[in-house]
Image (cartoon, rainbow, N blue to C red):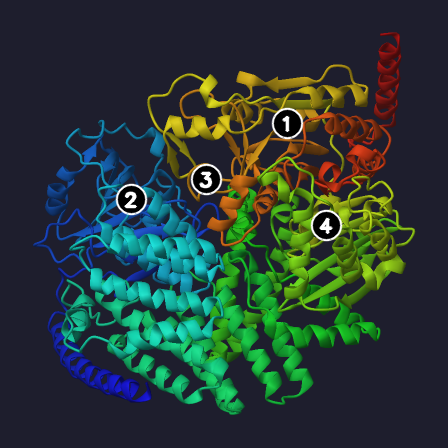
């Protein structure tokens, strides 16, 4: 193999030399042309880069414009590389561009092009800096949207801005940069230029218009590449899935295959391995189509991506087995896709004075091939390291570097991300070889390049990939024998970066943190208060699988509020400038006159960062949906005497714990590895509801494994838990699908009970719920935010929602139904909804009776539609009048309704045209609530669909999406939420449960009421199995009473108590 690899390197070296020679000649030619036309007045002065940072939009999301090389609005005779720019913003829900900004040689050329649009009447508008501008509403076939089209002129520059209604500001900012404005600052996409709604309507879409996909492959991959190299894998995955949902059956198989390949790799990066396998298989099927264009290239890409997939799974032997033959059989240097002149020309702009012989992003097909080859070499180098095959690792890395040089020209910004990846791998190799100084130098180079590449686009220089680089550098610094103070400082900086970027992807590789956590644990146990605080901070870096995407979307939703949006935007801008200055200071020479000024500004920004973060943390709405790190002192101040908060976090393959109460905190490490304990969690869960997939049989609850879990997770603090008045558990990944309430606290009792496996009576088993009321926390910051809210001031006690009608009972539909980005035919939706058992209003009537409030307002049947819910929850609606909202309906997991991007939601009846039968988690924050409690009584989905969803999500449990619903209701101003880990019963056990839960709610707090209801079922022999009571959990401020009045009025409380007494008396007379 080594001989073949050497031969390959020799061919690659010849290719590199040929590219360098051609590139040098082209640079000289283009440079001479630039000098010859430098004074030409007809040449526009727009920027020479192909990517423009546009600042943040109105909801705080960064936007960028990139040169579009395949805008179908231009004919083949026009060289179009520098003539059209596509606009995208982070967090957008579609794959296609939000806007296009086009440059023309004259207003006449623009007018001629306008014939391809279908437009309404023009309206003159004022556009700062431009000589003239008009706006009109048009249908733009290139975008596939109704857009606001602004024609603007500045000197000899003629532009057309075609923007979706929510992207006009970003389009205008693009035009300003292209016209030469804002070069010294003031860049923002938050511009209120035209009111789209007031523009004259465009004519109906021309009947001759051919329905086509908005997906532009090059454009989509260009943006996705940037997101992936910054570690924004969730954003890349969402964008690619949206693209796949938008392509139609007439889309060429090659495009569908390539989108599946990219989506597969994005999911693999997220560790959704099952979903990745499905994507690769689908791509493989498409590639079997005869005479598919690009089949050989895409087939090679499929093989390489499967090698990268194996690398993500840490199956290094499989990665080497896949990648080695691919690289040994690499095509010759005269392959058209690697032609150096073609590559260089592809990078050249149309305007003669626009010197561009390097990309800002490898977004052309030819360049993607070079990048693909480089990544394959890199992956082979990575796969060689675990076997300590340093020779192969170095050989493969050298070949990757040579391949990268074929796309490195005058401007290296476009491949800095790839160079950074290779520098990082060099650092790993040097560290494995014991050359720590060289390793650290390589990591420093990798960090500088990645930060510079981020700042050149729309990044802040603090993205996940950068944070992980810092963490890896810290671990190498420790191995090098550096001083403990220097090592701890590096780890501290890495943890801060991880905390800052954790909401942007699902998970980090945290194994390098284990030695640092062990050291902090040892110091904390020795009484070091600072180390204890650092330990708590480090425990907060992990984000749950799937939660990052939900957090991001809900933050954007919250950011739509002008005041909150301004805070988010300011935070982004300060962070970006802070990183820029940090890089500038690092690279400055000691005698640089600007260094003192830069340091002074850096210090000012550091203070501003602290202040604005404090403002964000003080905003309850943001905190309830974010995972900003909490402070230990804040936690202690909010815990009542006798109340305990327990946090469990997986770091690497270890589980770390922390018990916090009002008097102090106790850190500990769980015995054994996470990889050995998580299967125990799965076995306990399976012994509860695992048999329901195939039958209604009740399995024997595994009391022994449950006792093992308790001993491992809570054993170190068992004595301290005795006599506690309340327990708040933040179980993270460990208890993601299992309530701590079902854990068995006495191992000897478990052994005795195990000998009676045939018995279904678990009433004598000591469960944790019997020790104290238990509530669940999503994160420390969410706990803090929920505890800081006062009780509801709503005047009415309870409103319930029940009995959604399946579609088969609704009006017949002639058109497909859109569910998020998914499109379902009526028959598909009908089949899905008919498969869900109806949930009657009985439990809401029981709730009203137990609370002693008489009849409750119930929204049910045809009235319970998604549209009516949004109306009731509007600012002028009535939902804010109720202290308790009870939903007796099914919850839908992500991907359940026909495609992977259907949202987590609550099922409703079908409403009017435009209804989708779902109150989805991104709609819930729009509800205007003032609730002490929201009850989601049957919010898990059928087990069969849950299993399908787990496969699509690479092993994720279906209950994880409930996290999104819980967060969404917090954002809508619910103080607490009760939901379920699995589908709850609607039989007699449910009657017992809700009668006791709401009955206790008259006098006890929410957590105590749940404890009473669960213990009552435990004491009822036929319902003592955890299946009947263990599904329920409460999150949020569960120290409130359900009917608590936040007005603080003693008279109001007395009146309420008197009314309850009157109702009781009336009930007894009846």
Asked if the residue at tag 3 contacts the one at tag 2, i.e. Cβ–Cβ closer than 8 Å, the answer is no
Q: Earlier in the sequence, mark 2 or mark 3?
A: 2
Q: Say which element carries label 1.
A: strand
How far, Cα to Cα, is label 2 from label 1? Answer: 37 Å
Q: Nearer the viewer, mark 4 or mark 1?
A: 1
The x and y percentages for residue 311 are 44, 70
Q: Earlier in the sequence, mark 1 or mark 3?
A: 1
**How crowded is the residue under tag 3: few (<14 C-alpha within 10 Å), some, or many (20+)?**
many
Q: Say which element carries label 3.
A: loop
Q: Is residue 938 left or right of residue 43?
A: right
Q: Earlier in the sequence, mark 2 or mark 1?
A: 2
The x and y percentages for residue 991 are 75, 25
Q: Nearer the viewer, mark 4 or mark 2?
A: 2
Q: Earlier in the sequence, mark 4 or mark 1?
A: 4
Q: Which residue is mark 4?
A: 784
The quadrant in which the N terminus is found is bottom left
Q: Residue furthest right?
A: 723
* Residue 38 visible from this viewpoint: no
Image height check: is 87 above or below 438?
A: above
Q: Say which element carries label 4.
A: helix
Asked if the residue at tag 1 contacts the one at tag 2, i.e. Cβ–Cβ closer than 8 Å, the answer is no
Q: Which residue is mark 2?
A: 247
Q: Which residue is mark 3?
A: 902
Q: Which residue is mark 1?
A: 888
The x and y percentages for residue 971 are 61, 40
**How crowded is the residue under tag 1: few (<14 C-alpha within 10 Å), some, or many (20+)?**
many
Write the residue at 17% across / 57% down: 293
**How crowded is the residue under tag 4: few (<14 C-alpha within 10 Å), some, or many (20+)?**
many
How far, Cα to Cα, is label 3 from label 4? Answer: 31 Å
């Amino acid at each position: 193999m080594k001989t073949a690899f050497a031969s390959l390197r020799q061919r690659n070296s010849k290719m590199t030399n040929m590219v360098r020679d051609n590139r040098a000649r082209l640079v000289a030619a283009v440079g001479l042309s630039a000098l010859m036309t430098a004074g030409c007045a007809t040449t526009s002065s727009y920027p020479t880069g192909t990517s423009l940072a546009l600042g943040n939009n109105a909801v705080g999301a960064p936007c960028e414009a990139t040169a579009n090389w395949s805008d179908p609005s231009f004919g083949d005779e026009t060289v179009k590389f520098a003539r059209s720019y596509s606009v995208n913003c982070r967090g957008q829900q579609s794959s296609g561009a939000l806007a296009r900004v086009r440059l023309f040689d004259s207003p006449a050329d623009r007018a001629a092009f306008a014939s391809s649009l279908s437009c309404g009447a023009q309206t003159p508008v004022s556009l700062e800096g431009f000589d003239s501008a008009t706006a009109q509403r048009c249908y733009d076939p290139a975008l596939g949207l109704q857009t606001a089209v602004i024609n603007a002129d500045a000197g000899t520059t003629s532009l057309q801005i075609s923007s979706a209604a929510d992207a006009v500001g970003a389009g205008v900012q693009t035009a300003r940069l292209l016209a030469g404005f804002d070069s010294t600052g003031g860049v923002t996409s938050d511009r209120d230029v035209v009111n789209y709604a007031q523009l004259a309507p465009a004519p109906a879409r021309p009947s001759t218009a051919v329905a086509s996909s908005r997906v532009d492959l090059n454009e989509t991959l260009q943006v996705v590449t940037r997101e992936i190299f910054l570690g924004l894998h969730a954003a890349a995955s969402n964008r690619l899935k949206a693209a796949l949902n938008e392509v139609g059956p007439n889309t060429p198989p090659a495009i569908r295959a390539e989108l599946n390949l990219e989506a597969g790799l994005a999911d693999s990066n997220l560790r959704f391995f099952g979903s990745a396998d499905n994507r690769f298989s689908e791509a493989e099927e498409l590639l079997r189509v005869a005479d598919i264009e690009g089949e050989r290239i895409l087939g090679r890409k499929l093989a390489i991506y499967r090698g990268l997939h194996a690398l993500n799974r840490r199956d290094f032997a499989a990665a080497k087995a896949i990648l080695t033959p691919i690289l040994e059989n690499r095509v010759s240097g005269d392959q058209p896709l690697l032609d150096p002149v073609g590559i260089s020309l592809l990078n050249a702009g149309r305007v003669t004075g626009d010197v561009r012989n390097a990309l800002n992003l490898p977004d052309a097909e030819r360049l993607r091939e070079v990048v693909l080859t480089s990544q394959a070499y890199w992956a082979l180098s990575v796969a060689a390291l675990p076997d300590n095959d340093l020779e192969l690792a170095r050989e493969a890395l050298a070949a990757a570097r040579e391949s990268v040089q074929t796309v490195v020209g005058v401007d290296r910004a476009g491949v800095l991300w790839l160079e950074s990846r290779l520098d990082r791998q060099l650092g790993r190799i040097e560290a494995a070889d014991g050359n720590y100084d060289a390793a650290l130098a390589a990591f420093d180079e990798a960090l500088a390049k990645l930060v510079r590449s981020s700042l050149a686009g729309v990044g802040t220089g603090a993205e996940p990939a950068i944070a992980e680089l810092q963490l890896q550098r810290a671990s190498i610094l420790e191995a090098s024998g550096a001083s403990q103070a220097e090592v701890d400082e590096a780890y501290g900086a890495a943890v801060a970066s991880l905390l800052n970027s954790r909401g942007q992807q699902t998970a980090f590789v945290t194994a390098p943190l284990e030695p640092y956590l062990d050291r902090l644990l040892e110091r904390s146990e020795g009484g070091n208060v600072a180390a204890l605080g650092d330990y708590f901070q480090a425990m907060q870096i992990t984000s749950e699988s799937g939660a990052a995407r939900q957090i991001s979307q809900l933050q954007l939703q919250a950011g739509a509020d002008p005041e909150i949006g301004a805070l988010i935007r300011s935070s982004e801008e300060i962070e970006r400038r802070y990183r820029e200055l940090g890089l500038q200071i690092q690279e400055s020479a000691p005698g640089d006159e600007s260094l003192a000024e830069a340091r002074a500004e850096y210090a000012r920004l550091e203070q501003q960062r602290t202040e604005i973060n404090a403002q964000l943390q003080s905003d309850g709405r943001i905190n309830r949906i974010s995972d900003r790190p909490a402070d230990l002192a804040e936690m202690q101040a909010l815990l009542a005497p006798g109340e305990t908060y327990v946090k469990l976090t997986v770091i690497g393959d270890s589980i770390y714990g922390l018990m916090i109460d009002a008097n102090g905190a106790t850190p500990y490490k769980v015995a054994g590895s996470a990889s050995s304990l998580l299967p125990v969690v799965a076995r306990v869960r399976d012994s509860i509801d695992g048999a329901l997939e195939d039958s209604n049989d009740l399995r024997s609850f595994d009391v022994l494994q449950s006792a093992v879990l308790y001993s491992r997770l809570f054993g170190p603090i068992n004595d301290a838990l005795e006599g506690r008045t309340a327990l708040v558990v933040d179980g993270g990944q460990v208890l993601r699908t299992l309530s701590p309430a079902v854990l068995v606290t006495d191992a000897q009792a478990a052994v005795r009970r195990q000998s009676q496996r045939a018995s279904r009576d678990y009433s004598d088993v000591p469960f944790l719920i019997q020790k104290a009321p238990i509530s669940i926390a999503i994160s420390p910051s969410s706990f803090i935010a929920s505890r800081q809210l006062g009780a509801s001031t709503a005047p009415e006690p309870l409103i319930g929602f029940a009995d959604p009608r399946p579609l088969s009972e609704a009006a017949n539909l002639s058109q497909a139904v859109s569910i998020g980005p998914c499109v379902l035919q009526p028959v598909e939706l009908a089949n899905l909804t008919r498969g869900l058992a109806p949930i009657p209003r009985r439990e809401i009537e029981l709730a009203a009776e137990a609370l002693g409030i008489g009849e409750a307002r119930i929204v049910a049947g045809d009235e319970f539609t998604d549209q009516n819910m949004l109306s009731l929850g509007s600012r002028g609606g009535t939902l804010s009048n109720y202290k308790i909202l009870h939903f007796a309906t099914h919850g839908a997991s992500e991907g359940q309704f026909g495609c992977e991007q259907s949202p987590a939601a609550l099922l409703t009846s079908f409403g009017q045209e435009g209804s989708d039968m779902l109150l989805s988690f991104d709609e819930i924050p729009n509800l205007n609530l003032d609730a002490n409690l929201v009850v989601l009584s049957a919010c898990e989905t059928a087990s069969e669909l849950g299993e399908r969803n787990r496969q699509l999500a690479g092993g994720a449990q279906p209950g994880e999406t409930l996290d999104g619903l819980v967060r969404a209701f917090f954002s809508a101003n619910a103080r607490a939420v009760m939901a379920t880990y699995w589908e709850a019963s609607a039989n007699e056990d449910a009657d017992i449960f809700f009668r006791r839960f709401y009955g206790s709610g008259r006098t006890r707090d929410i957590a105590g009421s749940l404890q009473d209801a669960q213990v009552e079922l435990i004491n009822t022999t036929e319902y003592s199995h955890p299946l009947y009571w263990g599904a329920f959990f409460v999150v949020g401020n569960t120290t409130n009473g359900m009917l608590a009045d936040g007005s603080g009025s003693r008279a109001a409380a007395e009146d309420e108590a008197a009314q309850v007494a009157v109702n009781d008396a009336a009930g007894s007379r009846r």
